Image: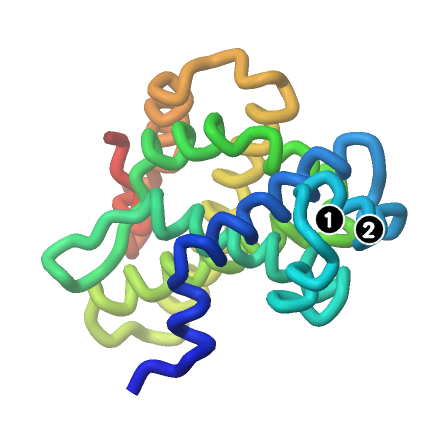
Amino acid sequence: MVRETDLRAQDPRVQRTKQQLRQALIILLKDSTPKGISIQAITKQAAITRGTFYLHYEDKVDFIRTAVADLVADFYQQVTVVVDQTYRQVSLQALFEYVEQQQAAFKVFYKNEATLHFQAQLTESMRQLMQDYVAKRYNQTSQADQIEMSITIDYLAGASLALVFKWVNDGLVYSPRYMAKMLYQLVQTPNTTFDVAQFFVEA
């Protein structure tokens, strides 16, 4: 049985309203901080009523937290590919193309990292995807192998996203295709027991 709340979440009108609100947040964060933005300012920028806002969110904190989480979820939905219906891999070209399209959000959310924890959420989700990838591709491992795997995953997840945000902050000087090629080359680690680098596909 599908819940009424689930049906409402799938309603295109609801999705459009949430997109308007998130876009309003992005615009306001260019010149302010989460603390300095009011619900009134958000609804005015989004051209919706406060009543409509409260249909979807409990308060400003709930809205901002959800807006960030939704972008993280959408990011990985758009940039991952499923292989043999078994595990998911990240397409680096799709990743950089998505960031290019959503660069305004990435800039302002990253600028407010101390409050929004946007990069931290992206990194943790990347780590979880990598761990799932390794668990499904490799057999039972020793404790020593698991330690190596954990450190490698931490490094690749953190370093790859650090490069993404550096690219954004530098003004997207290079094309998504070039960045995908460069990152793919950088993450290659042929001497590790677990070839976690194959989690990324260049195209």
Task: Please state the horizontal and vertical placement of residue 83, each as a whole percent of the image.
Answer: 16, 53
Q: Residue at x 42, y 15 (%)?
A: 175
Name the residue tied to disc 2.
40
Residue neighbourhood size for the residue with mark 2, other residues' Cα within 10 Å, grouped as few (<14), some (14–19), many (≥20): some
Q: In this view, does 74 lie to the left or right of 17?
A: left
Residue type at mark 2 is: Gln
Task: Please state the horizontal and vertical placement of residue 174, each as a whole percent of the image.
Answer: 47, 13
**What residue occupies the far right of the structure in this picture?**
36
In this view, the residue in front, 192 or 14, is 14
What count of labels does the image hold?
Answer: 2
In this view, the residue in front, 108 or 147, is 108
The relative height of residue 173 versus residue 21 in the rendered view (above or below) is: above
Q: Is residue 68 left or right of residue 157?
A: right
In terms of image quadrants, where is residue 197?
top left
**What residue occupies the far left of the structure in this picture?**
84
Q: Which residue is drawn at 72% across and 39% down?
A: 45
- Whether residue 47 appears in this view of the structure is yes
In terms of image quadrants, where is residue 10?
bottom left
Check whether the beta carbons of the residues at disc 1 and disc 2 lie within 8 A of each other: yes
In this view, the residue in front, 156 or 122, is 122
Residue type at mark 1 is: Thr
Q: Is residue 109 left or right of residue 102?
A: right
